[in-house]
């Protein structure tokens, strides 16, 4: 496992309410870890990446996720934050959880 550490400076110049709303959305797009842990994998999770939101974290964790194009679990990079349910530590776990739900959705 490789982890890249760094310092990031985010400067937001807020000049009006629209800019303020966009700035707030920038940091709140991802589902909270508590909410994520409390629910099971759902059909809507099939199209998600291993992370969500526009803020990219800089760790490098190899994970597995369902991929519609390949109709199966593929290796993917997870940056370490803003995790989604489509983020599995092993291919076996991905195949057990995601494949039955996502394949059924494709066959609709």
Image (cartoon, rainbow, N blue to C red):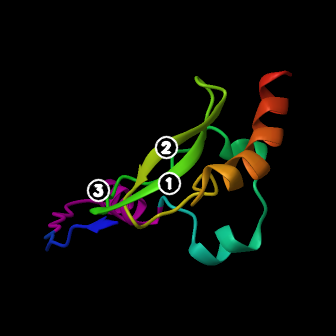
Of the two numbered discs 2 and 1 on the same chain, state the one appearing first in sequence.
Answer: 1
* Label 1 environment density (alpha carbons within 10 Å; few <14, some 14–19, many ≥20): many
Q: How many marks?
A: 3
Q: Which residue is mark 2?
A: 75
> Does residue 103 lie above or below 45 as drawn?
above
Above or below for 8 versus 68: below
Task: Decide which of 27, 12 is in the foreground and name it.
Answer: 27
> Element at badge 1?
strand
| Circle 1 residue | 63
Q: Main secondary structure of the magenta part?
A: helix
CB atoms of marks 3 and 2 within 8 Å:
no
Q: CA distance from mark 3 to mark 2?
A: 36 Å
Disc 3 vs disc 2: which is toward the camera?
2
Instruction: Choose between 18 and 102: the one closer to the eye.
Output: 102
**Residue 25 is inside the magenta segment:** yes
- Mark whose residue sits in front, 1 or 3: 1
- State which region is magenta: 10-28
Regarding residue 89, the answer to whether it shows in the image is: yes
Label 2 element class:
strand
- Whether pointer 1 and pointer 3 mark residues with C-beta atoms closer than 8 Å, the reply is no
Q: Which mark is residue 19?
A: 3
């Amino acid at each position: 496992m490789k982890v890249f550490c760094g310092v990031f400076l985010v400067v937001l110049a807020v000049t009006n309410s629209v800019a303020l709303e966009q700035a707030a959305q920038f940091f709140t797009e991802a589902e909270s870890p508590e909410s994520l842990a409390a629910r099971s994998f759902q059909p809507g999770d099939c199209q998600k990446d291993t992370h969500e939101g526009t803020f990219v974290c800089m760790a490098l964790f190899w994970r597995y996720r369902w991929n519609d194009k390949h109709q199966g679990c593929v290796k993917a990079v997870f940056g370490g934050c803003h995790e989604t349910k489509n983020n599995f530590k092993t291919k076996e776990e991905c195949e057990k959880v995601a494949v039955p739900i996502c394949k059924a959705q494709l066959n609709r």
